[in-house]
């Protein structure tokens, strides 16, 4: 609270916000919006017009508190609105395909600053233009700015395009130079930036991803479309076939099916809303497991959580390119209290984090034999008499990563900056 007893105000710039569908980043922003008022902060959300979104879904709109102001700036998608026969100029997609919201959002943000007088500005990547908006509003208003990096902007081979990489490097460098704090979701990612920008090391802070306990309230496990006695191994969310390649996993599954260690007539591997449906299906056909692989459409958020709770196993892929990151779904998986099959880079942050939890069968994402062994361990975990205790412990231990707990950490940082 301010000295006069009124809530402090934060202007939150986020491209991913309901009704956008397909980005787990929505949950991070939505969690802050929901829980910051408990800590004396009232948010105003500056986001994009829904036309800019490739896919929309209305189920999460109800999760936005009624007292929160949402301002939607004009925005377009270069790939859909400025293309001819599916092609567009590369320069029209820099720094990203949605850059058109930048000038409109700055204009709208200036009006919000004039009218609502926020104490702090926040912007969140991985849409780079969000940080351009946050930077511009901070410069124009003199207000402190927090730059949130849900993912690192640059890695050894990302982005691969040289021009895009140059532009992104400039945005990254300006954020590390000008923002009062740069927030990362893991300590490993923060350390990458502390080494890359030593002068900003003290301003690199960590607020982890997590899950929303309230989203699980009154949920019952579901198993949509399954026959009795089926074993459901579920991957819920986007799959990147290059960086999170399911090919070795499919090869391991085929080997176990051929040896009868897995029963073909009982197993169903479901990829719920993978975002690369055709690639997943093609890989499944290539490895001879198409008959046990189901590529399913998106579900409303709470229905997706209920399906996680009803699965026999929850599947995660995380390649070495993402060693400094942890998929946001990991926390939802752990809260869903089901056994995990984790196919991850063994030296990555995801592997280290999951090592602290029970009922997790892990293997190197690229090691077919190791994956086969992990599949066998998953099956053994399903039969273990200790399984209920393991899962209850996971559900308790993951509470440290609830949106409520992480918002309290974020609010403390906001208080520190405006003190």
Image (spheres, rainbow, N blue to C red):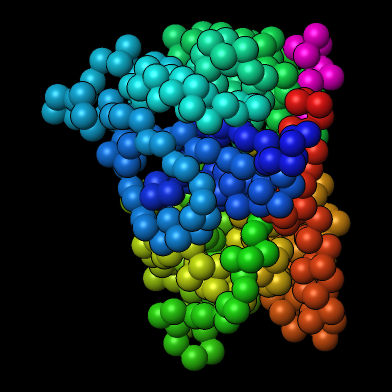
Q: Quadrant of residue 97?
A: top left
Q: Is 160 situated left or right of 329 in this image? A: left
17 up-or-down from 117: above or below: below
Q: Nearer the viewer, residue 391 or 199?
A: 199
Comparing 252 with 106, the one in front is 106
Q: How many marks?
A: 0
The structure residue drawn at horizontal position 41% and vertical position 61%, both measured from the top left corner, is 59
Q: Which residues are magenta?
A: 197-207
Residue at the spot 80% in from the left edge and 38% down from the top edge: 412
Identified at 51% across, 51% down, the residue is 67
Nearer-the-camera pick, 263 or 125: 125
**Is residue 309 shown to the viewer in this render?**
yes
Q: Residue at the location (73% across, 23% down)?
A: 181
The picture places residue 152, in percent across and down from the top left corner, at: 63, 27
Q: Is residue 183 left or right of residue 151?
A: right
Which quadrant holds residue 292? bottom left
Q: Is residue 126 visible?
A: no
Quadrant, the C terminus: top right
| 362 up-or-down from 391: above or below | above
Q: Quadrant of the N terminus?
A: top right
């Amino acid at each position: 609270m301010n000295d006069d007893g009124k809530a402090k105000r934060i202007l939150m710039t986020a491209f991913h916000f309901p009704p956008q569908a397909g980005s787990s980043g929505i949950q991070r922003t939505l969690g802050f919006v929901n829980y910051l008022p408990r800590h004396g902060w009232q948010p105003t959300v500056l986001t994009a017009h829904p036309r800019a979104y490739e896919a929309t879904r209305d189920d999460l709109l109800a999760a936005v508190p009624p007292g929160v102001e949402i301002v939607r700036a004009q925005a377009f998608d270069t790939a859909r609105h400025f293309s001819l026969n599916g092609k567009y100029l590369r320069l029209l997609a820099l720094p990203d395909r949605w850059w058109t919201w930048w000038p409109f959002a700055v204009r709208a943000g200036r009006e919000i600053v004039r009218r609502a007088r926020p104490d702090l500005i926040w912007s969140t990547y991985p849409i780079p233009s969000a940080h351009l908006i946050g930077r511009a509003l901070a410069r124009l208003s003199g207000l402190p700015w927090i730059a949130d990096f849900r993912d690192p902007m640059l890695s050894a081979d990302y982005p691969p395009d040289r021009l895009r990489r140059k532009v992104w490097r400039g945005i990254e460098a300006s954020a590390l130079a000008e923002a009062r704090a740069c927030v990362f979701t893991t300590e490993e990612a923060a350390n990458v930036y502390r080494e890359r920008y030593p002068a900003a090391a003290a301003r690199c802070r960590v607020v982890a991803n997590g899950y929303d306990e309230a989203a699980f309230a009154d949920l019952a496990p579901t198993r949509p479309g399954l026959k009795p006695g089926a074993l459901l191994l579920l991957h819920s969310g986007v799959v990147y076939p290059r960086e999170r390649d399911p090919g070795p996993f499919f090869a391991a599954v085929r080997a176990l099916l051929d040896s009868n260690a897995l029963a073909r007539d009982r197993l169903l591997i479901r990829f719920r809303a993978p975002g690369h449906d055709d690639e997943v299906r093609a890989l499944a056909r290539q490895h001879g497991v198409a008959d046990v692989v189901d590529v399913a459409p998106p579900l409303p958020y709470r229905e997706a959580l209920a399906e996680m709770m009803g699965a026999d196993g929850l599947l995660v892929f995380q390649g070495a390119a993402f060693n400094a990151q942890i998929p946001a779904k990991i926390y939802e998986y752990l809260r869903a209290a089901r056994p995990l099959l984790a196919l991850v880079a063994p030296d990555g942050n995801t592997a280290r984090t999951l090592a602290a939890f029970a009922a997790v069968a892990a293997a190197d994402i690229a090691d077919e034999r190791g994956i086969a062994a992990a599949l066998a361990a998953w099956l053994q975990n399903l039969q273990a008499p200790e399984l209920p205790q393991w899962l209850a412990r996971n559900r308790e231990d993951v509470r440290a990563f609830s949106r409520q707990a992480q918002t309290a950490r974020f609010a403390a940082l906001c208080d520190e900056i405006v003190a």
